């Protein structure tokens, strides 16, 4: 038996229920509870519901891309594997996959840190915290998540379902409270020129959509865990569309219910919009209980986020395209424990350094060109490659979902503001520079000798 065969590997221990639960608790984190005021403010009225609809449309269109790729390549690493194999493992695919890992090392800890910072912000409704105390809370939460995730994948799957029950229960209470105290004159009274479809309208829609997309992200988490999913050709697409459909319905009902209870002029300036919502309906005590449940949701989401992202640098390291230490698998728990530890450590530092508003837009914009547009274009390219791979799942009405996804992603990208666009381009250029230096040192593409080709 070779040394490689003796190395511990990942276990396919997650079924459809666990995969869907992991996706959904990733999607419903602290995001919607902290971004609702921003979304209402960007659109300046109840017409902000359009941003939630646009975000859902994008999630469905992009979900077809992830489903096709995830079913065809059910391996740990998600986008890293997809980009590498679509564009050629020894050519452009090596660059695209490296850029994705390069961005992931920055944006994945930022995603985790943003959720931890939002958690500390909402905790202030229950327990007043100073600035330093908020940082202590966010850092402690990341440590707790690392401890919870440092166990075998079957135990993680069971824990994810337990957390998912709390998420669905809280959202159900929120929607029930809104429907039983709904005021249509609040929800559907629009300001003058709310639908004038001017350049300013579309700029507001683009800015609001960045926040709704941030709240929808996570429908693809199952693809990061592709090497640990049972019957992945069937369960990966199913879990993606089940999670998108369920969360889109919950988000639309949640936004309408909040608008039907709190005037939008007040809601757009609220620091604890959902806590204020419950306090308006049921009083202070119920609002505190609801806030505690929101904190539960934040923990559940970050649990899923850290779980999925820890598999990305692991997958690259296994292929020899990233630092080898990330490829280590715990001999007993059979998880990439070093990758998990390093990711948690970086997120811990970020949670102490940044503020929430500084990271949400950056998280979205820096990923659009390489990951989301790159994959959508790649799916179209994949269909026409001579060396096509077997596709167990094929998107409906090909290539319409991929094309629509590209258009919406680019609309959001160019609506984000020049500072974010330039920042994203600078990160890409820096990644290309590092890739070329590394490739030259290793004599890999595009510097490989003719004898090695």
Image (cartoon, rainbow, N blue to C red):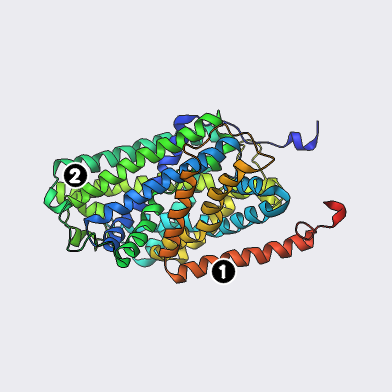
In the rendered view, tell whether residue 197 sits above or below residue 245.
below
Mark 2 or 1: the one toward you: 1
The residue closer to the viewer here, 155 or 64, is 64
Residue 10: x and y in percent read 62, 36
Residue 134: x and y in percent read 38, 61
How far apart marks 2 and 1 lie (CA) works out to: 44 Å
- Which numbered circle lies on residue 302? none
Q: Quadrant of residue 20?
A: top left
Lateral position of residue 88 relative to residue 52, left or right: right
- Tell me the quadrant of the picture where the N terminus can be found: top right
Residues packed near mark 2 inside 10 Å, few (<14), some (14 to 19) or many (20 plus): many
The residue closer to the viewer here, 157 or 255, is 255
Residue 190: x and y in percent read 17, 58
Q: Quadrant of residue 5?
A: top right
What residue is drawn where x is 35% and y is 51%? 54
What residue is drawn where x is 52% and y is 53%? 373
In the rendered view, tell whether residue 37 sits above or below residue 287.
below
- Which numbered circle lies on residue 426? 1
What residue is drawn where x is 41% and y is 54%? 115
Report whether residue 211 is seen.
yes
What residue is drawn where x is 30% and y is 42%? 250
Q: Secondary structure at mark 2?
A: helix
Residue that badge 2 annotates:
178
In the rendered view, tell whether residue 72 sits above or below residue 422.
above
* Most distant residue in the right direction: 451
């Amino acid at each position: 038996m070779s040394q490689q065969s003796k190395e511990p590997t990942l276990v396919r221990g997650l079924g459809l229920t666990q995969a869907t639960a992991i996706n959904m608790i990733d999607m419903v984190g602290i995001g919607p509870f902290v971004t609702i005021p921003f979304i209402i403010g960007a659109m300046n009225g109840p017409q902000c519901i359009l941003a939630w609809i646009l975000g859902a449309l994008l999630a469905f269109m992009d979900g077809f891309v992830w489903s096709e790729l995830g079913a065809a390549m059910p391996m740990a690493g998600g986008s890293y594997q997809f980009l590498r194999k679509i564009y050629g493992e020894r050519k452009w695919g090596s660059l695209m996959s490296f850029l994705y890992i390069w961005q992931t090392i920055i944006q994945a800890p930022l995603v985790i840190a943003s959720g931890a910072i939002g958690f500390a912000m909402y905790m202030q409704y229950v327990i007043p915290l100073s600035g330093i105390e908020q940082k202590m809370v966010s850092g402690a939460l990341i440590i707790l998540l690392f401890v919870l995730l440092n166990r075998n994948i079957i135990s993680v799957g069971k824990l994810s379902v337990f957390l998912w029950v709390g998420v669905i229960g809280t959202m159900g209470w929120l929607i029930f409270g809104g429907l039983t105290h709904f005021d249509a004159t609040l929800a559907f009274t629009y300001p003058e020129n709310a639908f004038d479809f001017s350049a300013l309208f579309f700029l507001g829609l683009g800015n609001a959509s960045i926040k709704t997309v941030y709240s929808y992200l996570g429908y693809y988490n199952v693809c990061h865990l592709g090497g640990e999913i049972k019957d992945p050709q069937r369960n990966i697409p199913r879990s993606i569309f089940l999670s998108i459909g369920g969360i889109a319905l919950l988000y639309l009902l949640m936004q309408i219910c909040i608008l039907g209870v709190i005037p939008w002029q007040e809601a757009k300036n609220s620091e604890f919009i959902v806590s204020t919502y419950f306090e308006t309906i049921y009083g202070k005590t119920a609002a505190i209980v609801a806030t505690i449940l929101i904190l539960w949701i934040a923990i559940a989401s970050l649990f899923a986020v850290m779980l999925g992202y820890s598999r990305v640098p692991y997958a690259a390291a296994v292929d020899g395209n990233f630092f080898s230490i990330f490829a280590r698998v715990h001999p007993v728990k059979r998880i990439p424990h070093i990758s998990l530890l390093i990711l948690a450590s970086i997120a811990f530092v970020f949670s102490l350094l940044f503020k929430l508003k500084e990271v949400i837009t950056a998280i979205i914009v820096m990923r659009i060109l390489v990951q989301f547009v790159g994959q959508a274009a790649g799916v179209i390219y994949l269909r026409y490659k001579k060396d096509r791979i077997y596709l167990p799942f094929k998107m409906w009405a090909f290539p319409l979902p991929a094309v629509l996804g590209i258009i919406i992603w680019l609309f959001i990208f160019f609506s984000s503001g020049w500072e974010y666009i330039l920042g994203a381009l600078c990160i890409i250029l820096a990644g290309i520079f590092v890739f070329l230096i590394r490739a030259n040192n290793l004599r890999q593409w595009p510097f490989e000798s003719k004898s090695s080709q």
